[in-house]
Image (cartoon, rainbow, N blue to C red):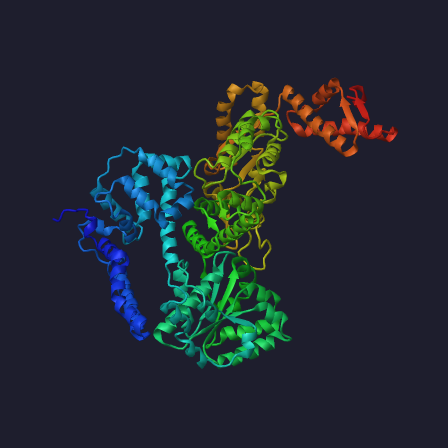
Amino acid sequence: MAVASFHLTATKQYIGLSLRRLIEGPVGWVVFLALLWKPVRHFMERGDMDPLGVSVVLLVSFLCIIHNFLKTKFENDSATPFNRTNLAGMLSVCMVRALRHRRNPSAHQFLVASLRSERARFILQEIGLNAAEILQQHQSSQEPFDLILWMQEAVIEASAFGEERVDANIVFLLLFRKEPLLQALLDRADIAMKDLENTVHWEVFHNRTIHKPHSLSPQSLVRAVGTIGRSWVMGYTHDLDRITTDISEHLRSRRTPIVVLNTPEIETIQRVIYRSTQHNILVLGKVGAGKRTLVENFARKLRQDERRNNIPFTRVLWLRTELLLSGTTNPDAFLLNALAHAQRAGHFILVLPDVGALFRAANANLKAVVVQFLQAKNVNVLGIVDAQDYHTIIKAEPTVDSLFEKIAVEEATEEETMSVLMEQYFSIERKGVAVTYKAFKTIVELSQRYIGKGAFPGKAVEVLEDAILAAVRQGEKCITEQHVREVISLKAHMNVQKVTEGEREKLLELEDALKGKIVGQEEAIHALANALKRGRLDVGVRKRPIGTFLFLGPTGVGKTETAKVLAEIYFGSVDRIVRIDMNEFVTEESVYEIIGSPDPGKQHAEGFLTKKIQDQPFSLVLLDEIEKAHPKVLNLFLQILDEGQLMDGLGVKTDFRNTIIIATSNAGALFIRDFFKAQENAPEQHPQFRQQLIDEILKQKLFSPEFMNRFDDIILYFPLTREQALQLAILMLDGFIRDFSEKKGINIVLEEEGVAALAEKGYSIEFGAREMRRVIMEKLETYLANYLLKNTVHRGETITVRKADLEL
């Protein structure tokens, strides 16, 4: 068995570089000048230019031949090495050039060599590290370095990344993997090793993109003009050309994309269009899922296959619906005539870019023309429609629906979306705009979490474009994570900025802030505060809602009020509450009110809850009196609580991972009241009683064990003590007096005795805060109304209210 070795001078790359230096260096120039001396002297003596011209041409030709020979045979990373046991032969030309004076390079010399490369500098730019800092940090490294073992690992690593040689990017990654001092730099920059690996993948992708054939390369020229005459055999289609765009011709001048999603779907379309019957296709998918891109990639592949097989071209014509409907006098007659002429002019595929919009705006005659051509054997129609329009418009017309072969475009994965974003970025990189890896990562993560409408990759590309515009307006050329967070904050109507020092203090004091607005209920406040901290700081794996809670307790003890305060503190407004009164969902059909009906034309085409969360994914869902809902409705929430998502009636997935779900219930209310009266709300008895209450609820079959186990916490709300009732009264009165003063400009002073009397009068174990609110309205508000009717009070004046005034 051959023993691995490392001899840099015995590699093709080293020999090629040495020959180039010899030919292009001083020795070479001396030889060239010597060869040209005789023709130059001849020219100077006789004025005859011909020998000199011939000599120059021959010499330049010779140099070009030598250059190409060295480039292809020696300085080519794809060339087979002299000896595979010589690991130096697996280095790239770039690395050999940087290490040519090192017989046995050290780890630090490898690092220095890699940082001279554009490939390593690209990685540095994306992760935000400084080359000088890396070199300084690595100088003090004491890690042992075995050159042979290290090179063997580097070869394996290069293969894993699809690289033929060990280049600067692989050297950079491997050194960071092996050196603790370099890993410390990553930690300080808040970069995980996985992030660095992903950045190297990105760099490999970038390197392949920038080395694609130039638009003037032979391959590109053949693609663009090599078969131009073949399209001349197609007939004249003036009318159809007026209302369509030939995307086959349009795509010919554009680069072939590296990232092509939905390859199986493209192949399916190709099979379907060659059928003799049922050869029309309807592409279904969410907005942003890439339906149009799928059609363009199909048109590109179709043209490539036809060119390769030397068969007549098929024109893929994109119908401009707005021109058909508004730019023609009789759209149905015009389309009928245009398509009839086009049928005689050669094979074409008509693309309807928005079938839903076309059928919504079309009259009966135009629909009949479309159906006629859907039924024709020699015409292919390729329609595009989003999921909602398909269910509400197309499925409502079974004849039309039956004429299409349906192809669903699934939402791109996060990895596929990253690839699409990278290719988008590489197309604008030449304009001097840079985007960091962390910015891309943030786009994907936060778009998925906070932007409900649309699908990947479309909504992520939109965020990228907006972030670039925002940065350019600010006079910046590098798009960072901060720019992305600013854009998503605007789109999601909420703050997704990183936690600042001020917010950090706010989160730490969150529990105290909740206690200031909610009287009693210490357990509920503690659990909710912890959930908010976890959600804001992204602690843990987020595959479920931010927090899910079941509030159990009698009426008027603050269950709904807690949800309102929570929405105001965490989501920024009580408008973020999606409130559902569950006593309105007592029948089996109530399921469709929540998720929408799958049958077109029926009531509740859109589900109330799924629509709300799709529009506003960052919300608090409040399920009032959940025990009254039908069991099938409860089963829907089982899926939401467990998986954080729900499929609506239109087949659209709704993401609940950015919601807090609070279900309130009066189940066991009498049980809680009896315990309170007997124990005087002794806190030490609460844990034992909590389990007794849950057992009683399960015994009565109010909820199933599976349902109750899905909640993060089951929180008990107890009636208020008299001391807590006084606190509640003060809180309510403060709010009333503040609102009154802001509205009327009149101050109110309520004596302490009056406050105590109102609290005593409003205290009720059975009705809680509701009774307190009723008493305040009945006594204080009535008194103020009478006082203002009897007296003239100006803005800035004060009304003093005594206990006797309240008639308590």
Instruction: Please state the horizontal and vertical placement of residue 791, each as a whole percent of the image.
Output: 87, 28
Front residue of 352 and 243: 243
Residue 808 visible in this rendered orientation of the protein: yes
Q: Residue furthest left?
A: 1
Instruction: Please state the horizontal and vertical placement of residue 411, each as a whole percent of the image.
Output: 46, 54
Picture layout, residue 799 above or below residue 449: above
The C terminus is located in which quarter? top right
Please indicate whether residue 740 sits to the left or right of residue 267 in the image: right
Residue 406 visible in this rendered orientation of the protein: no
Instruction: Please state the horizontal and vertical placement of residue 738, each as a whole percent of the image.
Output: 72, 29
Front residue of 29 and 578: 29
Q: Residue at x 41, y 43 (%)?
A: 127
Q: Say which quarter of the image contains residue 553.
A: top right
Q: Residue at x 60, y 75 (%)?
A: 332
Picture layout, residue 739 above or below residue 42: above
Front residue of 105 and 686: 105
State how many labels appear.
Answer: 0
Instruction: Please state the horizontal and vertical placement of residue 167, each as a whole percent of the image.
Output: 30, 50
Q: Residue furthest front?
A: 45
Q: Residue at x 56, y 79 (%)?
A: 337
